[in-house]
Image (tube, grey):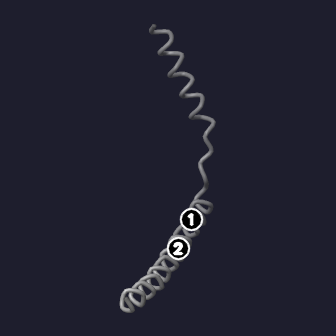
Amino acid sequence: MINKIKSFINEIKEELKKISYPDKKALKSATYSIIFIVFFVAIYMEIIDLIFKAILKYVFNIY
């Protein structure tokens, strides 16, 4: 049982050595890309919300 646990921990250590972390430049670029995308998706969602609000206001004022 102890040998299985040791083997498992050693396998975890070997897998962790295989991980490649991004350098600072790549990380910065990815962060800016995500912020840019989130910003424009938020603007898009707000525009769609305003359009639907105007449509619903128009429909419910008629009836």
Q: Nearer the viewer, residue 35 or 25?
A: 35
Query: Which residue is label 1 attached to?
Result: 28
Residue 43 image label: none
Q: Is residue 35 left or right of residue 61?
A: right
Residue 56 screen position, x and y as percent: 41, 84
How far across and down, in percent of the image, does residue 53 sit?
A: 41, 84
Element under label 2?
Answer: helix
**Compared with residue 37, is residue 27 higher up or lower down, i.e. above or below?**
above
Q: Is residue 21 above or below residue 50?
A: above
Spatial separation of the CA atoms under disc 2 and disc 1: 20 Å
Mark 2 belongs to which amino acid?
Val
Q: Amino acid at mark 1?
A: Lys
Residue placed under numbered mark 2 in the picture: 41
Residue 33 appears at what percent x and percent y?
58, 68
Q: Which structural element holds mark 1? A: helix
Residue drawn at (57%, 23%), measured in percent from left and top? 11
* Mark 2 or mark 1: whose residue is earlier in sequence: 1
